[in-house]
Amino acid sequence: MTNILADDGRRRVVIESVSPAVDGGRFPIKRVVGDRVIVEADVFADGHDALRCMLRYHQQGARSWEETEMALINNDRWRGAFEVAELGRYEYTVAAWVDGFLSWRHDFVKREDPADIVLALQVGAMLVEAAASRAKGAEARALRGFVKELSADSAVEERRRLAAGDELLGLMMRYPDRSFSASYPLELEVVVDRPLARCSAWYEMFPRSCAGEAGRHGTFADCEKRLDYVAQMGFDILYLPPVHPIGRVKRKGRNNALEPGPNDPGSPWAIGAKEGGHKAVHPALGSLADFRKLVAAAQARGLEVALDLAFQCAPDHPYVDAHSEWFRRRPDGSIQFAENPPKKYQDIYPFHFESEHWAALWEELKSVFAFWVEQGVTIFRVDNPHTKPFSFWEWLIADMKREHPELIFLSEAFTRPRIMHRLAKLGFTQSYTYFPWRNTKGDLTEYFTELSQSRSREYFRPNHWPNTPDILTAFLQSGGRPAFMARVVLAATLGANYGIYGPAFEHCENLPREPGSEEYLNSEKYEVRHWDLARADSLAPLITRLNRARHENPALQQDWNLIFVPTDNHELVCYGKFNDERSNIIVVAVSLDPHHTRSAFVELPLEEFGIDAGRPYQVEDLLNGESYLWQGPRNYVELDPRVCPAHVFRVRQQLRSEKDFEYFA
Amino acid sequence: MTNILADDGRRRVVIESVSPAVDGGRFPIKRVVGDRVIVEADVFADGHDALRCMLRYHQQGARSWEETEMALINNDRWRGAFEVAELGRYEYTVAAWVDGFLSWRHDFVKREDPADIVLALQVGAMLVEAAASRAKGAEARALRGFVKELSADSAVEERRRLAAGDELLGLMMRYPDRSFSASYPLELEVVVDRPLARCSAWYEMFPRSCAGEAGRHGTFADCEKRLDYVAQMGFDILYLPPVHPIGRVKRKGRNNALEPGPNDPGSPWAIGAKEGGHKAVHPALGSLADFRKLVAAAQARGLEVALDLAFQCAPDHPYVDAHSEWFRRRPDGSIQFAENPPKKYQDIYPFHFESEHWAALWEELKSVFAFWVEQGVTIFRVDNPHTKPFSFWEWLIADMKREHPELIFLSEAFTRPRIMHRLAKLGFTQSYTYFPWRNTKGDLTEYFTELSQSRSREYFRPNHWPNTPDILTAFLQSGGRPAFMARVVLAATLGANYGIYGPAFEHCENLPREPGSEEYLNSEKYEVRHWDLARADSLAPLITRLNRARHENPALQQDWNLIFVPTDNHELVCYGKFNDERSNIIVVAVSLDPHHTRSAFVELPLEEFGIDAGRPYQVEDLLNGESYLWQGPRNYVELDPRVCPAHVFRVRQQLRSEKDFEYFA
């Protein structure tokens, strides 16, 4: 404990439990540009004096603080808010004091004894005099005017009216005595990202499978031709697996075979060969200039290119010779490959983060990010960040975002909850989730309630993927096309951030390499594939409508406004989302049964939605354009998986009736 | 954020969310001598390496730390425990590291490839060699022996057995490589009190009403004669309202009359007169020597005397002349009395804690405590602490307890929750509660669940009072004797700390000064009363049995082990308490209806109690000695308020049956 007597014992206000705060201020909260940060605190003092409480905030590095008044909610809890208008970091804290004038006034207006009132007027005049000495110019003169009037010989009633009046109050609020103001000991941080950090639709695609004709290795130029397809579906981000040269030593063949065929291209995650490492592009994809051209062409269509950075090396990565000190050596002099005994992954050399040369390794890896930022990339999907030290990521992300606050880092950590959360806390902008394995109504409700309502939402921005090149879930395998439809509707409407791995997804590719596996048969990870984008059964039209709904409805652009809606069928999940003003309300109903038609009554929380239960309202399905008239909370929904297992309703109550006619009544 | 590169990037372990901790370590938790402090933490690292985790602790001020190993529970949560054996303050924190040997061993035992095993044995030998250099004497020699054997040319299988064996493991656990050990940044504190801080029964009594005959002002000597009465009821603490000289200026008369009669003794809380102030005793009670004699006589009976310290002054308190700088002055030169406009309390001068001379005031007030400690008092009930600055109390209590860790401070703050909690956090040993106003089953269940299960239990030790000289609740007023019985059973069994204001309580005194008031008619606060302790309807026998049950049953000596038991009657509340070993189980059933017989089926959580639902068990009512045989969770209870509205059952399953006979089977 600090020496209390060393401080001024007259600081009587206590400030506790300032929220939001992550781990007692150890980590920043996350917001996007334009957000209002709502801050609360427990603020109180001994006795019954009146308090004032200020929310203080500024951009990190600014010398002075902005202030905005906090208001008492109840139970000694105070609330204020400020806007984060710029990218980067802000800080906020709370200050409060026992306000002499407000305390005086609070008693003054209740006084009845004329002698007391006269004495209290004298005390009041002294307080106003003191405020005048803190004020300047016209306001100081106005305050001195009040001192004179309060001290005058005029009628007590008139002086009392002036002393208790709003004009004096307003002036005194501007010049409080803050001598014994107390400050919350922590300055809490906010990382402010681009709005895209909060709402984004990702499309993952292997560049080498983008050739117009079968049998050819795709190039960046082929990817450019694919851009319209992706942009027209309404995605925001085109995410490419690693584009670097692929190792030849211990290369894996198709379907992860130990012995590759002569033309097998290898896994893009086995990074590095004689052509270069993490700062090079695979020659078969084109040149760095081609890559930059692709990035620019994407931008022209409103698409951003996200790159996958995977910090591991193929045995023939140039680092292995040039920096063998960054790898662990076995007693026989060989370099330690990745392993999980008895399994061996001899095509992959992990970096040795306990090397004596860790600092140089950190700098080099950071320079990889810097290199790709120079090529125009601002969004990174980071492969397996949980197998590198946490402090490395905290340092790297903070350092990169200092100069480039626009950067977005997606954490691909499918691991234990504490670890995923730590990565989010320390700086990752978005995080993959357990969504692929949440397929029942109970699981979805519990998981999304946690994600959208618990304190972790301050730092953990979920990004939901129904599939990835590594994850073809049993639900998709067994449920086929209706399952794909249901899962993409859930991902795109439960979450403001979502992504799919295509065209495998649009084409409902659902064969596993072997029963019980989540690996794709003939996975693009190990071979070049050719996709017929014109297939009649493609989900591209559905996805296009989904992404349009997301772009047109603010309710779908955030995570925190989610409410689950009770239904009387356990295979039918229903939920609502709305914007703060309740001017945009979306209700989604999804059948989790890909095999049978399911129906249910849903119980909409109309009060929460701001909808008058006594008047009809319209729900329009944004997936097929059909409209229904509903009234009251309880309504019927029926979903045939062969048609579409989901409704995405926009709810509107601005229906006209006879009362809207000019001559009515 | 600190400069991460300045630290060693090889510290890969993360330690988060260490519990218990109050406000991120700002305040200590509370325990009593002999407690085991159970500490948990989230501890994890990147990757899959094995960790070790240590709970570190010591008495505050000690240079070195004790350590005890923490074990993984699940979900990256680790747990350890240490005992607090001495009064005073302890500190604890957590350290953890990626353990090279454990990680190596984890992989080693799963290896199958003979060539890998040979290489791994070499790595293992290097790790053991390094440990040998950290060890000394016989253990260093033993480790070197292992190095030789692991590196020998002998059969791999034999070397493998040795490398994976328990003997080597045990040695290696003793000499880990902690070079990259991480430490939790906070050292958390525990205040360790006497066991009496956790479990105590208080009896409040006005010394001036203790005279043997009516019409005489009682003395300390009379109090001595009353000690047997109090001790025989089984109380631990005899608490006396202020014993100082009482002011004559503006003295209040009987029933708080503005004009006192000539013989009215005044309120003991109007402290100070020409005979002295907070360090003097009222002459009518006796001398300081008499007071010390009372304290000693009480101790001889196992009773401790608690004193009420109320920091406020009557207008004729010696401080008012000697230290007028400690009071606020009105513009007319008079001293500001207490007020809550339009109400005035002209008999009371509050101290002015915003005085420039606050530091001297603080020192003087602390010297008041020190004075009474010198007279043998170690327990203080502090009057209205919430009207003095929080930092004053934090400083005073910490300072007093540094030399006298045996001191107990009870906070009499009936105010808003945040304020009561802050006083508990900053150092008050026990706190009055909202118990007087929690009279329904729902309210009792909610409040006691919060008190016993929420995080606030780490610092807030409740002390429950069915009545006080200021609080005669509507429930007691209207419910009469059965209400008093129910309330004292609730207080004494729901809470490990409780107290009553007697003899008003034993005598079921329930007349208010006026309808709607919680003030007693003819309150002892303003007059001397005479009590006939031999009254046949006294609750003393019930209270005696209650306190005996408390002393004999560890289950009733703590707050955290409370479980509410469902009943099918909303006027009948039932709950269980048990000790950690489940060797002592108490089940209490109380009817909240003072007017009618009530019955209910109760559903005991037998599994929680460790009771075999398939065998009968005995419940013995400790209030009347009757026993019942029960079986299974569902049992019938009937309570007639005219007899007793409560059962306090001790539950026992050690019933003998034919199977216990030696020749059975």
Image (cartoon, coloured by chain):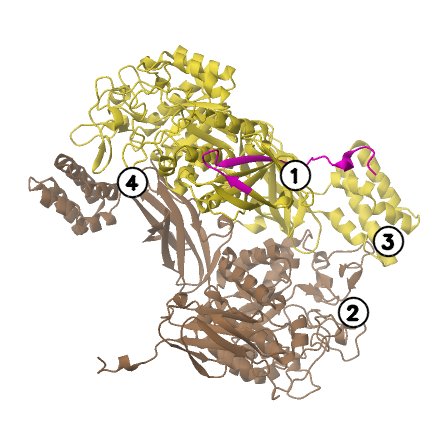
Chain colours: A yellow, B brown
Q: Tell me, yes or no, whether the highlighted magenta stretch contains residue B67.
A: no
* Dot 3 alpha-carbon crowd within 10 angstroms: few under 14, some 14 to 19, many 20 or more: some
The residue pinned by badge 1 equals A617
Q: Amino acid at mark 2?
A: Lys
Label 4: element kind: loop
Q: Is A665 in front, or is B348?
A: A665
Label 2: element kind: loop
Q: Amino acid at mark 4?
A: Asp
Q: CA distance from mark 2 to mark 1?
A: 70 Å
Q: Is residue A170 left or right of residue B587?
A: right
* Dot 2 alpha-carbon crowd within 10 angstroms: few under 14, some 14 to 19, many 20 or more: some
The residue stretch that appears in magenta: A637-665
Tag in front: 3 or 4: 4
Q: On residue A118, which mark appears?
A: 3
Contact flag, marks 1 and 4 (Cβ < 8 Å): no
Q: Amino acid at mark 1?
A: Tyr
Q: On residue B49, which mark appears?
A: 4
Question: Please, which chain is the residue tagged with disc 1 on?
Answer: A
* Image location of residue A27, percent across then percent down: 48, 38
Q: Tell me, yes or no, whether the highlighted magenta stretch contains residue A649.
A: yes
Q: Is residue B602 visible to the viewer in this orientation of the structure?
A: yes
Q: Is A558 in front, or is A105?
A: A558
* Image location of residue B282, percent across then percent down: 67, 75
Tag in front: 2 or 4: 4
Q: CA distance from mark 2 to mark 4?
A: 76 Å
* Residues marked 1 and 4, same chain: no
Question: Please, which chain is the residue tagged with disc 2 on?
Answer: B
Tag in front: 1 or 4: 1
* Residues marked 2 and 1, same chain: no
Q: Amino acid at mark 3?
A: Val
